[in-house]
Amino acid sequence: MKNPLKYPQQSRNRLSSSFGFTLIEILVVVAIISILITAGVAGLGNLAAGKGTATAVATAESLFDEARTIAVSKRCKARVMIDLGDSSDDNYLRRIIIVHERIGSDGNAVADDWVLDNRGYVMPGGTYFSQEYSLLADKTKIATAATHTLSGTDIPSAYQKEYAFYEFNAEGISSEPGASFVVGSGVRPKGQEPKVTKSSEKDFSGFVVWRNGTTSTYRSPLQIEENTDKTLPAPNSPF
């Protein structure tokens, strides 16, 4: 056996080859780390987008339930309304409010005299109400068939604009049973309609409103396509 003290250079070479890394090995490790970081960032983006639609749908369902409760308790019409006003406004297609008919001094509802019940809910950033996939039972777009321009002396100016709406009567019955409420993830430069991105493709969620005011959540994007008879949009397409 050779004495390492007698052959110091050979000993150092053996130690270097036993415990060191070659340049190729280091480059391979760096490449793997880069791939993992890229995949992780993409995954986090998809997770955040999915969380946004899930949160929006869960909150919207609670607002529908609240509107129905108001209609029954006050014996008047109540509406859940989605902002269709100024497309340059950040609340466009994101703000949801509840209004109900004013109750007169005689205790009866004043027809079409609307009162703002709350300041509303704004959906998470990158999450928008879909005008294309939120439909009445006959497949007509709600944003076309069921719209209302809110106005009145008791309505703050910031809320006096056009809305799509879902209505409940004094018995808590939906005026449009079978109507769907759909939201999707995407990007929306000011003044434009929201568009699907590659990372948010198929990231849509929502529910159907039944006659008695209850809702049924879509279990998957495929159910949205089946219910609306429409294929969900490809990246860079508006929704």
Image (tube, grey):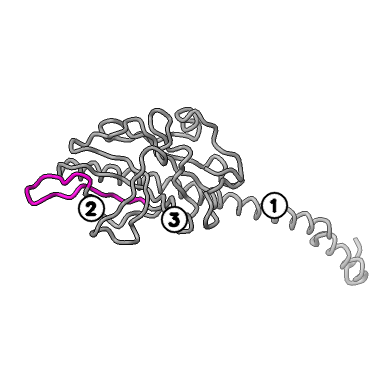
The residue beneath circle 1 is 35
Q: Position of residue 218 (x, y in %)?
A: 42, 34
Is 1 drawn above or below residue 192 in the view shown? below
Q: Where is residue 209 in the image (x, y as percent from the top left)?
A: 33, 34
The amino acid at mark 1 is Ile
The residue beneath circle 3 is 86
Magenta range is 96-112
Q: Position of residue 190 (x, y in %)?
A: 52, 57
Identify the image quadrant of residue 28: bottom right
Identify the image quadrant of residue 144: top left
Depth check, front residue: 208 or 39: 208
The amino acid at mark 2 is Val
Q: Earlier in the sequence, mark 2 or mark 3?
A: 3
* Label 1 crowd (10 A; few <14 / some 14-19 / many >=20): few
Magenta stretch mostly in which secondary structure?
strand
Q: Residue at x 20, y 45 (%)?
A: 70
Is 171 drawn above or below residue 82 in the view shown? above
The amino acid at mark 3 is Asp
The residue beneath circle 2 is 115
Q: How far apart are marks 3 and 1 (CA)?
A: 42 Å
Q: What element carries label 3?
A: loop
* Label 3 crowd (10 A; few <14 / some 14-19 / many >=20): some
Depth check, front residue: 102 or 58: 102
